[in-house]
Amino acid sequence: MKLYELPALEPEVTALAGEGVICRRAESYERKHVIPFVRERWPEWVDEASAAFARVPSTLYFATEGGRVVGFAAYNVARPNFFGPTGVDESQRKRGIGKALLLQCLHALAAEGYAYAIIGGVGPAEFYARSVGATLIPGSDPGIYGSMLDVAHG
């Protein structure tokens, strides 16, 4: 997707803050709160979420409500210029949290000088198309994840 034509970030983040949902970049000392949230819901993404905390500043944004983690998004963890993984607690979906976290990560990539971004392992393609005008790259599935080690299944 084109990072030089991203929708504005502030309206999304400000609207959520008005509802008590804070979306911001994670600090290294918050790993102990975010990683258990990821592990409980998406154990296959713990390695990538952990890698985001190895960078300074971290390349992970998260959302909280009432002191509880309700969503996260990371970038530059599987490969440079890649967005993901990302997830919002099932009970919190359809509130705009995923879009706000996506935009925070994409604006961060743009600030690093990238003109385009890649979403690795796209799940809900229509969400990304609607939110930021992303398009599928033909023949990119499974992409870099095709050679992933799977000890449990040979």
Image (cartoon, rainbow, N blue to C red):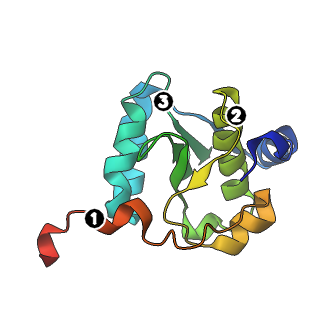
| Residue type indicated by callout 3 | Ser
Q: Which mark is residue 87?
A: none
Circle 2 or circle 3, nearest the eye: 2
Disc nearer the start of the sequence (1/3): 3
Residue 146 place in picture, x, y as percent: 33, 68
Q: Which residue extends farthest front? A: 139
Q: Is residue 126 left or right of residue 69?
A: right
- For badge 1, the amino acid type reads Ser
> Visible in this render: residue 130?
yes
Q: Residue at x 75, y 48 (%)?
A: 2
Residue 110 numbered mark, or none: 2
Q: Marks 1 and 3, how far apart in space?
A: 26 Å
Report the residue at 19% width, 68% height from top. Answer: 150
Q: How many other residues sit within 10 Å of disc 1, few (<14), some (14-19) or many (≥20)?
A: few
Q: How many angstroms separate mark 2 from mark 3 (CA)?
A: 16 Å
Packing grade of label 2 (10 A; few <14, some 14-19, many >=20) is some
Residue at the far top: name it.
56
Residue at numbered disc 1: 147
Residue at x-position 66% and y-position 50%: 102
CB under 8 Å between callouts 2 and 3?
no
Q: Please, what secondary structure does the residue beneath circle 2 have?
A: helix
Instruction: Give the residue drawn at x 15%, y 78%.
Output: 153
Q: Which mark is residue 58?
A: 3
Query: Quadrant of the rendered structure where residue 113 is?
Result: top right
Q: Nearer the viewer, residue 110 or 20?
A: 110
